Image: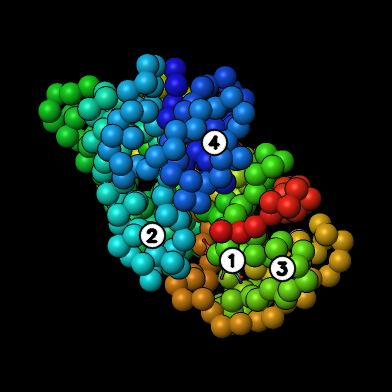
Amino acid sequence: MTWVVTGGAGYIGSHVVAAFAAEGIPSIVLDDLNSGRTAFVPDGVELHHGSITDAPAVAEVLRRPGVEGVVHVAALKYAGVSVREPLDSYRVNVEGTRILLDECLKADVRNVVFSSSAAVFGTPDTDLVTEDTPKNPESPYGESKLIGEWLLRDVARAAELNGDRPFRHTSLRYFNVVGSGIPTVYDVSPHNLFPILLAAVTEGRTPTVFGDDYATPDGSCVRDYIHVADVASAHVAAARALAAGRDIAPAYNLGRGEGVSVKEIIAAVADVIGRPVSYDVGPRRPGDPARIVTSSERAQADLGWTAQYDLHEMVQSAWDAWNVAAAEGTARLG
Ligand code: UDP
């Protein structure tokens, strides 16, 4: 049985496709190539070039024979950009998800794994976030992901009320996804710490730490970094559980439960590249919580999922993939 992976040509989506393939689960990619790249789609996997906001394109892939479910990764993902361009986030992340779900129902595709985000929590007032921590998104991006979760919940509730075949879903809330599990795929984001650091050290520029006067041990922000291959394997576990009709939770937080500061990431990069990395300290970036770290106990209990990779492996694999692209002349952000 086949899964449609929206955004499957992107950094995270292509890792999901590869994880499915490694488990013998076929997939079809639907991607508008806005931030995805054709070269990121694993060999042998069909790329259908189209947007989730284009109902006929969505319908075409969902009506392929044997489609069992959708992993919905496609989105505009830059929280900072979303503050300046809120309607774009709502158009793609909310309206695109609405269209996708509408077409899922019409095609009778009733299993959906949704890419949600730590951004739904905003700035939590707890050291260890759980799935039940209050949701206070601070950007249109975070809001759009929370609305996506609500859309899934509402569609499932309506199916139940209407006596339709059950609509089964879960949302995976990614914390800070980094690293590479495919030698030729790297994070292309011009806004995230890892790619910014790797590009800076390659190009001889000095990166900037956005604020070191936070109430954290070294003053820089603390995040829960997780390897993209670990995130991908959670999708396999979630898809399997949905397909098997198992009762799973509406949402799972995916992290390692370990807080790492920006300065510690810079030190880890220095360790991997074998030379010191100097940095400037700039002003705080608006909307950055001082610390956000999650427990993933629920994912472990329900999905049998635990993160396998440590910080060194995350930095090393990101650095290796960036260098493969650099050697090919294809290393660029954006
Ligand atoms: N960051 C930084 N300098 C940069 C980019 C990011 O200090 O050039 C910090 C940012 O303030 C945050 C952490 O790195 O504390 C992770 O940022 P990223 O954008 O990768 O992910 P986010 O946590 O915002 O989802």
**Which residue is the site of mark 3?**
200
Q: Where is residue 238 drawn, in percent x and y?
A: 46, 31
Answer with mark 4 or mark 2, whichever residue precedes in sequence.
4
Compute the Cα span from label 4 to label 1.
26 Å
Other-residue count near label 3 (Cα within 10 Å), few / some / many at <14 / 14–19 / ≥20: some
**The residue at label 3 has a CB less than 8 Å from ligand 1:** no
Kindly identify which numbered label has been placed on residue 142.
none
What kind of residue is marked 1?
A: Val
The residue at label 1 has a CB less than 8 Å from ligand 1: yes
> Residue under circle 4?
16
Q: Name the residue under label 1.
A: 222
| Label located before the other in sequence (4 or 3) | 4
Nearer the camera: disc 1 or disc 2? 2
- As shown in the figure, which amino acid type bears the numbered disc 3? Ala
CB-based contact (under 8 Å), mark 4 and mark 1: no
Q: How far is mark 2 from mark 3, CA to CA?
A: 26 Å
